[in-house]
Image: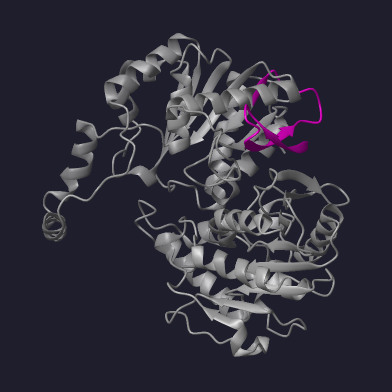
Amino acid sequence: MIERAFRFGRAQHLVGIAGLPESTPAPVGVIVLNAGLVHRVGPFRLNVDMTRRMNALGYATLRFDMSTIGDSGASGESQTRAQQVCADVDDAMSLLQQQAGCSRFVLVGLCSGAEKAHTVARDRASHTRLTGVVFLDGFAYRTLGFKLRYYLPRVFNLRRWTRWLGRKSRELAKGDAPSFGVAPLPQDVVSEDLRDMVGRGLKLCMIYSGGINMYFNHSRQFRECFGSVMASPAVSTRYIEETDHTYVLVDDRRHLIDHIEAWLCRNFPTAHAGASP
Amino acid sequence: MKRPDKELPFFFGTRGELFGIYHPAPRSMGKAVLLCAPLGQDYIRCHRLYRQLASTLAAEGMPVLRFDYYGCGDSAGASSEVDWDRCLQDTATAAHELRARAGIDHVVAFGARLGGSVALAAAQAARLDDVLVWDPVLHGDAYVATLDALQDALRRDTKRFVRPREWVDAAGQWLGFEVNPALRRQIGALHAGWHKRPSLLLDTLGDAAPHDWKGLSVDASSIRVIEPATPWDDLARLEAAIISHPVVQTVSSHLSGACG
């Protein structure tokens, strides 16, 4: 495996590390997006471990910083957030195509990275080169099933009620705090997007963690959120209750990478598939 | 102030195992600055501040090299392979690389937490002309005890995990990173007996963390206490970036003022 550092992109404003396998790379390349504001190495170096494992399997990879994150600057263009995300990923695909000859790509995103991967995957016009997406703690919504699983065990717990009332009264006293978050896409839009992605032939791998148990708490919730498309053979889902949102424990990260590796090898086999060290 | 050229990411060292980003300066003030990163999660939390500091110093006329030790960041090696002596060796390699790229022999190093300790310990081998440190780790045994306690609290944190994790799940790790027994011993044995004295010591530990800097034998005039305290050991902010404009400004002023 060889790693090379690049400054690239339409304004030479992006910084990334391409990982190239020793042998001829698979036609499918893997691109790992930033998780939140953590630079390209990922939370606890998850992205480094993941891309190196993929390289050992024969996949070319790129972990890079999107515009204004980590070591990347701004492109200087006047673009919407979605346009900028798509343009950054386009630049990343072009770099990996140039360096490794990849013609199709899989995106991997955790948390806000999953949201960005979704932004790219729903854009059918500009991303014909995309062939698969790994969503780690991507979009999720509190369903009736979630509420039953969450609230029923708590209904008869007096201590929880006391804590809840205390919290509510503090919130009321504080008033409305300004919110700077980005509003998530509505559930029906995301469901339709996922159906459309599968319809276009994309393979989807959705892995959600116990770290988001305030709005997602069971493997059944994939179907509760997004409907029958979750039963498609093109979609793989997994809920790992015991792990946290950013996989802080070493073995949790190892198991996550094992799972992604197995999904990649199953859906995009290479000559080296199964040769993981 | 002229805008410096874009930073250059590259691999260096005899086998190309070390990753660095070089920040060229538009004009030369006769000294170059090597930024020594802390280890573990502190490295990730400080990444943005290091980049801001590097850009500021480069704009002031000091070329800067940021780099990752073997087993850290984008450099080769697994997290489990980080070794203290190799960190010191990598610092000397990076100082050599900076001299070659900048064409300047006078190199100053800056480091936060264990990065400060690395800079002080590597000063002689790396031929560092000056060292600036920010909350350096002087007492390895106390530092190891703090990290062990934080790791134990982390595995039991039900804000992070649905249920507390078993001790064995979290063993041999500090806050997200595998720690090999040799590194643990090396860090545990750290004590402030370094030959080099820093010309500037930034103290942002606050009252919550009892500390003294006597081991460094620095003059009181070299110590700058900056408020607010940096939450290095606050588990609730484990994944929050460390940002401090006063730290960047103080380092920049110190180095610009000291430029001949």
Q: Residue furthest front?
A: B1
Residue A109 left/right relative to A10? left
Residue B131 in magenta stretch: no
Q: Quadrant of residue A142?
A: top left
Report whether residue B12 is seen: yes
Say left or right for B216 vs A43.
right
Which region is colored magenta?
Answer: A1-29
Instruction: Determine if residue B115 is in view.
Output: no
Image height of A141 relative to A42, above or below: above
The mark tally for this picture is: 0
Q: Nearer the viewer, residue A107 or B13?
A: B13
Where residue B31 appears, as percent x and y from the top left, is 77, 65
Q: Is residue A124 left or right of residue B54?
A: left
Q: Along the horizontal axis of the image, is B237 left or right of B88? A: left
Which quarter of the image is occupied by the C terminus of chain A?
Answer: top right
Of residue B124 and residue A257, the one placed in the foreground of this image is B124
- The one nearer the camera, A248 or A6, is A6
How far across and down, in percent of the image, does residue A255 sit?
Answer: 55, 41
Where residue B128 sits in the image (x, y, percent)? 80, 71
Please name whichever residue, A17 or A162, is drawn nearer the observer in this view of the structure: A17
Question: Which residue is located at x 52 percent, y 74 percent?
Answer: B146
Q: Quadrant of residue A227?
A: top left
Could you tell me which quadrant the N terminus of chain A lies in? top right
Where is residue A58, by image quadrant? top right
Q: Position of residue A14 (x, y in %)?
A: 62, 36
Q: Is residue A231 above or below residue B83?
A: above
Q: How is the image coloured?
A: one colour
Residue at the location (74% across, 50% down)? Answer: B24
